[in-house]
Image: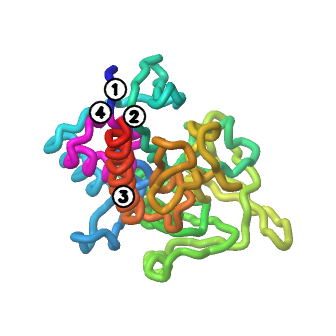
Amino acid sequence: MGNNDVIIIGGGPAGISAGMYASLGGLDTLFLSKAIGGQAWDSTAIRNFPGFNFITGPELIERFKEQLFGNLKLAHKVVTVTGIRKSGSDFEVVSSSAETFRAKTVLLTTGMKRRRMQVPGEVEFSGKGIGSFHALAASRYEGREVVVVGGGNSAAQAALGLHGAGAKVTLVTRSYTPDHYLQEKIEAASIKVVTNHRPARLEGTERVESFVAYDVDSRAEMSFRTVMVFVEIGLVPNSELVTELATTNRRGEVKIDANCRTGLPGLFAAGDVTATFGKRILIASGEGAKAILAVEQYLENLTDKA
């Protein structure tokens, strides 16, 4: 494909916001992502996004998609990006289908992925009773016993979403730290919360049948019958594409300056994949917009030097 001004890689809030600003700014833009929405899909209740007293993640993402691809007609491809390389003064982006795309700049907005428990049975039962929470699939667990592992906001939102869909939910965690309003909702819903426990293993035959955790102090084990284990124990950045092009910190987050620039000219990053403080939909959206403003300035400087 021909040379673009910018290729945006990643379909979460940062990438969507960047795509909007790039389109409105008249940049020759290509938007590449294997899925649209990122972690926002998992949010059952967003109360901190301007213009909405309440909206779910899937609803917000659908509005983003309509604006970006329906109204603005942004050029996009649903692909998995497997590599980014510098080619002269430009960049080449390679997909899993062996397609190569060229651009003067690249903006990485690949977000984060789920952290694994690293316990026996986790790999064996992948797709067979263990996974992450998605609001659109919650209804399939109505009347069934499920376990949510984790003690932060994501775990609390998953527990509430499943409870609201009629599931019998147990939340198991080492430490319990959701925002206060989420704790109040958990308590009001009478969702069972088991604290001071760590995952031990998954048990079952063809599918997960029970989740075993142990008390951190006594080491005593507790078993929970379940048809599904939802792992919500944190996230790690999807920064593998740029580990040889940019600097990352010990958590794997891409280091950027105040203008979303990495150390490599023309390579920008925004959103949860970066070391920017605050992993929130609104912050990621703002960073995506800011990154495109920085891209525009970079391209203007290239033209001035030509």
Q: Position of residue 194 (x, y in %)?
A: 65, 71
Q: Position of residue 219 (x, y in %)?
A: 85, 66
Where is the N terminus found, in terms of image quarters? top left
User: Going from the N terminus, do you reach mark 2 or mark 1 first?
Assistant: 1
Residue 60 appears left or right of 214:
left
Residue under the image location 70 percent in, 55 percent down: 250
* Residue that carries the numbered disc 3 in the rendered image: 290
* CA gap, disc 2 and disc 3: 18 Å
Image disc number at residue 301:
none
User: Going from the N terminus, do you reach mark 2 or mark 3 first?
Assistant: 2
Q: Is residue 274 visible?
A: yes
**Mark 3 surroundings: few (<14), some (14-19) or many (≥20) residues within 10 A:** many
The image quarter containing residue 48 is bottom left
Element at badge 3? helix
Q: Nearer the viewer, residue 215 or 280?
A: 280
Q: Nearer the viewer, residue 75 or 134?
A: 75
* CA gap, disc 4 and disc 1: 14 Å
* Residue that carries the numbered disc 1 in the rendered image: 3
Q: Does the stretch in magenta take in 41?
A: no
Mark 2: amino acid: Lys
* CA gap, disc 2 and disc 1: 7 Å
The span shown in magenta is 5-33
User: Going from the N terminus, do you reach mark 4 or mark 1 first?
Assistant: 1
Q: Indicate the colouring scheme.
A: rainbow
Mark 1: amino acid: Asn
Element at badge 2? strand
Mark 4: amino acid: His
